[in-house]
Amino acid sequence: MSEHTITVAGVAVDTRHWIGGERVASAQTFPDVSPIDGSTIGGISRGTAMEAAAAVAAAKAAFPAWAATSRAERARILHAIADGVEKRIEELAIVETTDNGALLRSHRRGVMPRVAHNFRFFADWLLKLEHEDFETRGHTNHVSWDPAGPSVLITPWNAPLMLATWKVAPALAAGNTVILKPAEWTPLTASLLADIATEAGLPAGVLNVVQGYGSEIGDALTSHPDVRRISFTGSVPTAKRIAESAAANLTPLSLELGGKSPLLVFADADLDLAVDLAVEQYDNAGQVCLAATRFLVEESVAEEFTRRFVEKAGQLTQGDPRGEATDIGPNIHPLQLEKIDGFVQRAVAAGARAVIGGHRKDGQYYAPTLLTAVAQDSEIVQEEVFGPVLTLQTFATEDEAVRLANDTRFGLAATLATGDPERAERVTAQLVAGTVWTNCFFVRDLQAPFGGSRHSGVGREGGTWSFDFYCDLKNTVTSPNGWNNHG
Ligand code: NAD
C-alpha cells in the first residue's frame, strides 16, 4: 500500500488523482471529513490547473483509439465494470456512507446495485442505438452518433457514485473519454471507480479522475479548448459560472440543477398514501434534488393530513446512518447545517410556525422540520434548502394549486396525490416539471428523460437523450448516382 492510500472502514482507497492510467499526487492535500462523527478520513490530493490540464491531455490522447473501439467491445468493458461494481457493493456502500452520511442500507440494497445497472443499461442501449435510414428524392439519409471527444463530468456530494455514473456510463459507451471531478466533500468512491474500471480492462486515459475544490480546479477544466462536452450536476450558482467559463469555446453543456418541487395533495387522494409520499421527502436528510419540499394541500384535508404526517414523521429514527434501523442520517457538512438552520430561523422570524423540528440536534444532525404559515413569495418557499425542511401551504381550488406549484424559478419535478385520473391528467398538463409522479415517488427508469426546466437545468439525461448529448450526430446523405462501376 502506498503512503497515499487510506483505509476507510477496512477498504483501501487511493487519495490521488487518476490521470492517464497512473496515480498522480498533488503538492497539497485537502481534508476529507466524515459527516457521521466529524472525524477526518484522510488528506486528498488537492488538484490545481496543472492536474486539470494533464487530465484533459490524457483524455485527448486516449480518445482516438477509444472512439474507434467497436461498439461491442465498449459494451463488453462496460459490463465488466458493472461486474466489478457488483463484486464490491459492500465496500462501495460503506465507503460512500462514511464519506457522505447517507444510509448504509440504501447504499447496499438500492444505490450501488443501480450504479452497476447504469453501466449495463448504457452498454445495452449502445448496441441498439439506431435511426432507420430514410429517403429524400431517391437519396439515402443515414443518421450516426459520432463520439464527441473528451468530456468533463462534474458531480455533487449527495449521491456521489450514483450521479457520477449516470454521466460516466453513457459518456464511455458513446466512445468519449472522461475527466470526472467529484465533489470535494465526497471524493472517495470516484477513486474506487477508477480501480474498478482499470481491473475491467478500460484502457489508460479513457477515464480520468481529478480531485479538488471546484473553485480551484473547475475553471481549468470547463474553459479548456480540448474539452468537447461538460456535464454538471450541482447548484445553480456553480452552473452559471460553468456556463460562463464554457462560453469561450461554446462547449456544449448538460446541467442538472436544484429544485423546489411541490407535492400536491387533493382532497380526493388516498390520504395514507399521500402521507407516505410526504414522509419520504426526508430521505437522505432532505439532500435530494428531486425532493417534493413544498406540500400544497387542499384546505378541507389539510388538518387531517398534517395530523397523520406528524404522527408518521414522529416514527422516523434519526442517527448513525450505518444502523439498520436508521431512517435519517446526518447532513453533509457543518457549513450545510448552518445554511439549513439559517433558512429555518429566518423563516420563523418572518412568521413561519415549526409544526415539528425547527432546530439542530447534537452533531451534524438537523431535526426533521415542517413549517406552516409561510408566504408564497418568502425565501423558505422560493429557495432550495437541501436539508430535512419541508413547508406546508393550503389551496382552495385546482387552479390555485397549479399556480402555487409553478410559482418558483425551478421546474425539476412534481408529485401528485389524487384519486381522480382526469384531474391528474389536467393538472400534469399544466405543471412545469421534468418529471411528474402521480400517487408515487422516485420511480425512475433510465429509459426516461431526466432533467429540469427553468433554473432546474438544461438538457435531459437518460436513454437516447444521453447519447444525443455525448455524440456529434451526423446525417450522411448518399446519392444513388455517381458510383464507379466495379461490377
Ligand atoms: P455545487 O454546485 O456546490 O458543487 C457541485 C460540483 O461543482 C462539485 O464537484 C464542486 O466541486 C464543483 N464546482 C464548484 N465550483 C466550481 C466551478 N467554479 N467550476 C467547476 N466546478 C465547480 O453543488 P453541491 O452543493 O455539491 O450539490 C448540491 C446541489 O446539486 C443542489 O442544488 C442540488 O439540487 C443539486 N443536485 C441536482 C441534481 C439533479 O439531478 N438535478 C442531483 C443532485 C444534486
Image: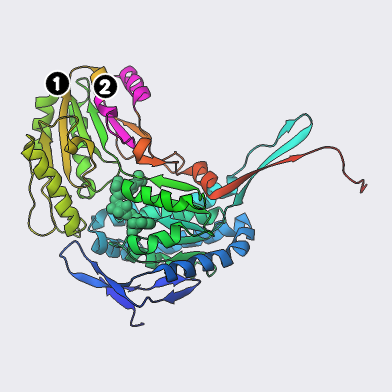
| Range of magenta residues | 404-431
Other-residue count near label 2 (Cα within 10 Å), few / some / many at <14 / 14–19 / ≥20 = some
Q: Say whether residue 440 is left or right of residue 196.
A: left
The answer to if 423 sits in the magenta stretch is yes
Residue tagged 1:
299
Seen from the viewer's position, the closer of residues 9 and 169 is 169
Seen from the viewer's position, the closer of residues 450 and 85 is 450
Residue 37 - label: none
Q: Say whether residue 57 is left or right of residue 65.
A: left
Other-residue count near label 1 (Cα within 10 Å), few / some / many at <14 / 14–19 / ≥20 = some
The answer to if 292 sits in the magenta stretch is no
Closer to the N terminus: mark 1 or mark 2?
Answer: 1
Can see residue 161? no
Query: Which residue is rendered at x = 44% and y = 64% of the image?
Result: 84
The answer to whether the residue bearing label 2 lies less than 8 angstroms from the nearest atom of ligand 1 is no
Q: Most extreme residue toward the front, as rendered?
A: 248
Quarter of the image with the N terminus is: bottom left
Q: Is residue 119 above or below residue 382?
A: below
Three-letter code, disc 2: Gly
The quarter of the displayed image where residue 352 is located: top left
Report the label total.
Answer: 2
Residue tagged 2:
419
Give x and y (percent) for residue 337: 16, 54
The kind of secondary structure element at disc 2 is loop
The quarter of the displayed image where residue 444 is located: top left
Give x and y (percent) for residue 92: 33, 63
Query: Which residue is rendered at x = 33% and y = 60% of the image?
Result: 215
Seen from the viewer's position, the closer of residues 480 and 351 is 351
